[in-house]
Image (cartoon, rainbow, N blue to C red):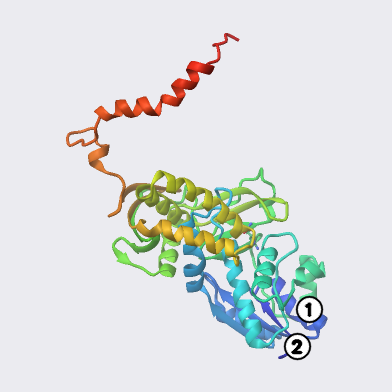
Amino acid sequence: MAPNRIVLAYSGGLDTSVAIPWLQEHYDAEVVTLTIDLGMVDLEEIRQRAEAIGAHRALTIDGREDLVRDFLLPALRAGAIYEEQYPLATALGRPLIAQYLVETARAEGAFAIAHGCTGKGNDQVRIDVGVAALAPELKVIAPMREWGMSREEEIEYAAARSLPIRLGRSAYSIDENLWGRSIETGDLEDPWHQPPEDAYAWTRSIADSPDEPVFLELAFEKGVPVALDGEQMPGVDLIRHLNEVAGQHGVGRIDHVENRLVGIKSREVYEAPAAALLHTSHKALEALTLSREQLRLKSRIAQEYADLVYNGQWFTRHREDMDAYIRSTQEHVDGTIRLRLHKGNCTVVGRKSPYALYDLKLATYDRGDTFDHSSAEGFIRIFGLPVRTQNQIQRRETRSD
Ligand code: ARG
């Protein structure tokens, strides 16, 4: 046990770079940094920076497979989209970060974990609650909540200690993983302002996207996407590839005024090309393979699931209970969805499944119709019975006013 050791979630940015000496000085502690790749991160470069700044040890984890298998695919199968807009990229990454921090703190014998979340956002809640669920004995330190330094003061603090920091060129606060890119602050804080083009990095504008559409065929097994255009593709590769293709066609831009858990409304801009495309496809396949009643209950669960993820309640029995229900609903969600990507739109143009509940012989208006038209009359008489009865007994007089 090293009682003066802290594991810091280290992104390589200004805030967490300044946190290394700050934690050393305030807690007289050794700081072990942990950098996690949940998307497109140069782990080695960031690791070296942590060492150069004075980390006792700089550790890295490639978390992409865990993220996809344990968080993104369950959220896709659940249909979890917060406030009908946000596919929850950042929110789904946080519990995994909490999990890795806890595992590392235990392996390193640390007494605390630290992270760079501010005191205004949802992310502090997700990490703190995640750590509390998994390791209540660990202390959580959020330097940014405590130190009250502005960006300029952080830069001075780093300069005074000659820290080799790298100042990002971006005018925004950005968080990204395979499921999407979250963009905040700067010009975006005025909800009347159209997001400037430089806020976007993964998606082309409609004007710059190709004039010709592209068509894709996405195959699912039990609600999990498994193949693209007939070729099996593991989750991480598939999502990366779909981000690329859908992003080129301008698919997946989201501009939303969102209700944060801490009570603030905030203007949020997201890019989530693969997530948008996968949710659209998955939903279309469910429309083909689930009953009306299953679809209705499942859409209520989807909202509940999205709120739970957003609110940092991942490590709960409630989530596991919902997962059990969702898993059961996905038993027959097998099939292929054909999509057309063009100028910001992702449109379903075809669907097929060995378990489709759609039956052409019942649906057709052409020859081969097997629907029994004569029984419709009796059905309508019974179905309309309560409507008829109530109107006979209680009908309001039609009023002219
Ligand atoms: N509003 C989003 C959420 O709560 C995104 C947060 C993004 N964080 C960031 N550091 N830019 O999930």
Is the residue marked by circle 2 packed among few (<14), some (14-19), or many (20+) residues within 10 Å?
A: few
Residue 227 in percent (x, y) is at: 34, 64
Q: Residue at 65% of width from left, 45% of height from top?
A: 193
Query: Judging from the image, what secondary structure is the residue with disc 2 in?
Result: loop
Residue 171 in percent (x, y) is at: 66, 60
Which is nearer the eye, 152 or 128? 128
Residue lying at the far left in this picture: please name it: 367
Q: Quadrant of residue 25?
A: bottom right
Q: Which residue matches tag 2?
A: 3
Q: Quadrant of residue 31?
A: bottom right
Query: Judging from the image, what secondary structure is the residue with disc 1 in?
Result: helix
Q: Residue at 65% of width from left, 65% of height from top?
A: 126
Q: Which residue matches tag 1?
A: 22
Q: Is residue 310 left or right of residue 1?
A: left
Q: Is residue 312 above or below residue 109?
A: above
Q: What amino acid is found at the position of numbered circle 2 in the picture? A: Pro
- Tell me: is circle 2 under 8 Å from ligand 1: no
Which is nearer the eye, 324 or 98? 324
Q: Is residue 338 left or right of residue 7?
A: left
Residue lying at the far top in this picture: please name it: 400
Q: What amino acid is found at the position of numbered circle 1 in the picture? A: Trp
Which is nearer the eye, 11 or 64? 64
Q: Is residue 113 above or below residue 327?
A: below
Disc 2 versus disc 1: distance between alpha carbons?
A: 17 Å
Q: Quadrant of the C terminus?
A: top right
Between disc 2 and disc 1, whose residue precedes?
Answer: 2
Q: Is residue 223 above or below residue 211?
A: below
Q: Quadrant of the N terminus?
A: bottom right
